[in-house]
Amino acid sequence: CLSLEEWKNTFSEWIEHGDPEALLNSTIFFDFRPLWGNAGLAEALRAWLMPHAAANPRFLHQMAANALRNRPPLGMVRDFVVDGGTLDLKLNGVSPFVDAARIFSLAAGVAATNTAQRLRLAAPVLKIPAAEVEGWIVALHFIQLLRLRHQHELSGAAEAGTGNRINPDQLNDLDRRILKEAFRQARKLQARLAMDYHL
């Protein structure tokens, strides 16, 4: 367990040095929430962290470049790009939204940790149209719904550990079309991130 000052030093190292391990830690630890004990310590850390991260454009640029590595699995002709016949809904569906929301919230000084809240609160600061943000949120919620529904169907089954991977050919036509549009929304979100950070 670290003190507030030790956590500040740790986060400062990650922000100021931005090596691959620091970026990985940032994607994990920047979403912290207090679960037990003195919540004031977490609030004090977040109050210190938000302006510190926002003041480091190199760090945000590196975070954005890292976030763009997980692309939505759509091909050139807008069909799904599968790996072993399946799509990874967490890595290539949910992560693009979560990662972009984290970066937008850090850039805008938004302290929220919920992805939808981050997007909604950062949008006015970053001049992102509300309708665009709502499209992203609806897309994220649909991908999460498919993911949870699939995991529920697998619960107790031998392949329960594969709950993030779905075979798109097993989806009904409506879910398949909506999932394609959800992935298009993820592409739009990533295009916005790439534009904002010149990537």
Image: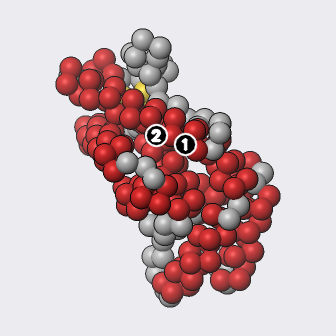
Which secondary structure lies at badge 2? helix
Which secondary structure lies at badge 1? helix
| 2 relative to 104 in the view: left or right | right
Dot 1 amino acid type: Leu
Question: Which one is in front, 161 or 6?
Answer: 6
Give residue 193's mark: 1
Residue at the spot 55% in from the left edge and 42% down from the top edge: 193
| 187 relative to 56 in the view: left or right | left
Give residue 189's mark: 2
Dot 2 amino acid type: Leu
Residue 14: in sight, yes or no? yes
Judge the density around disc 2: few (<14), some (14-19), many (≥20) Cα neighbours within 10 Å: many
Above or below, comparing residue 178 to residue 53 in the picture: above
Q: Which x, y percent locates residue 119?
A: 41, 55
| 17 relative to 26 in the view: left or right | right
Question: Which one is in front, 39 or 62?
Answer: 62
Q: Which x, y percent locates residue 46?
A: 56, 75
Do callouts 2 and 1 mark residues in contact (Cβ within 8 Å)?
Answer: yes
Above or below, comparing residue 64 to residue 14 in the picture: above
Q: CA distance from mark 2 to mark 1?
A: 6 Å
Q: Which x, y percent locates residue 88?
A: 45, 32
Residue at the spot 39% in from the left edge and 29% down from the top edge: 184
